[in-house]
Image (cartoon, helix red, strand yellow):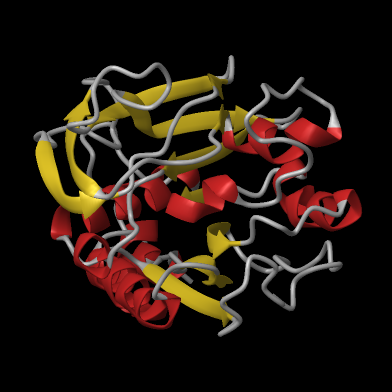
Amino acid sequence: MKHLPLFASLLACPALIFNTSAEVKPIRVLLLTGGCCHDYAHQKDILKQALESRANIEVTQIHTDDGSTHPNLPIYGNADYAKGFDVVLHDECAADVNDPKVVSAVLKPHQDGLPGVNLHCAMHCYRIGDPNQPAETGTPHAYWFDYLGLQSSGHGAQKPISIAFTSSDSPITRGFTNWVTVNEELYNNIQIGPRATPLARGAQDEGKRPGQNNTVVAWTNEYGPNKTRVFSTTIGHNNETVSDSRYLDLVTRGVLWATGHLGRDGKPETGYGPGGK
């Protein structure tokens, strides 16, 4: 019996032809929301809809309506809370969750290499000790700040923030133009970690106070021995900002970069664009 050439055999059996697009699975995002001072009930849905429409992303929400500084998120005490996900998007506001064991459990997936994305009040979570005092790396005081790559302790009045992108070679910010937000909170910078890379700075009409004005508002970090990818932005207090397409594009790129699916040109890699394109 004469054997067909390989190419002809494949044509005769279409089922054998590999469909690479079918092999691409959505990026599984775990979105954590709840706690003090923000309209998380609406912002969680704004983020979910925007991320899923901009990239091949599937968002699972864990939310609490507890508006305190010690919200009862069900992840606390469970170091396996992020099992099965590709990235955790921290958008909680839990300033008074400060038990070192609880904080360590929140960080465990990231210590093991799971990427993280952090928005706005996530920078003021899990504060062990005085956040106004520079934290020494490796101490409980620095647990959360080591992960973020930047230590912040507060903000001034809500006023428009002029955002200037400072890293022209980062795929996260490639092609972005500077913009001015609506009234927003500009977070201070107590210190910036050695493995953090600033991407954007923000300035308000608040004078030249050190650590308060012209501060880093978006950056990346390499966390822990696994050099876990972490992207953060302090912008995002009000719904109008969270709904802004420029903000949502920035967050989407942060997710894509953290999970390793953002091209050098700032576009999603093949299969990770909208609808899996």
Q: Is residue 228 above or below residue 270?
A: above
Whether residue 227 sits left or right of residue 247 in the image: it is right
Whether residue 215 sits left or right of residue 125 in the image: it is left
Whether residue 37 sits left or right of residue 247 in the image: it is right
In percent of width and height, residue 57 lies at 39, 68
Residue at 9%, 35% in the rendered image: 177
**Which quarter of the rendering shows the C terminus?**
bottom left
Query: As rendered, which of 19 and 145 lies closer to the eye?
Result: 145
Whether residue 147 sits left or right of residue 245 in the image: it is right
Query: As rendered, which of 127 and 58 lies closer to the eye?
Result: 127
Query: As rendered, which of 101 and 47 lies closer to the eye?
Result: 101
Residue at 58%, 37% in the rendered image: 148
Can you see residue 116? Answer: no
In percent of width and height, residue 254 lies at 38, 46
Q: Is residue 125 above or below residue 266?
A: below
Can you see residue 245? Answer: yes
Q: Quadrant of residue 129?
A: top right
Residue at 24%, 34% in the rendered image: 173
Q: Quadrant of residue 10?
A: bottom left
Q: Quadrant of residue 241?
A: bottom left
In percent of width and height, residue 270 lies at 29, 53
In percent of width and height, residue 246 lies at 16, 52
Q: Is residue 91 above or below residue 257?
A: below
Residue placed furthest toward the right:
101
Query: Number of callouts in the render?
Result: 0
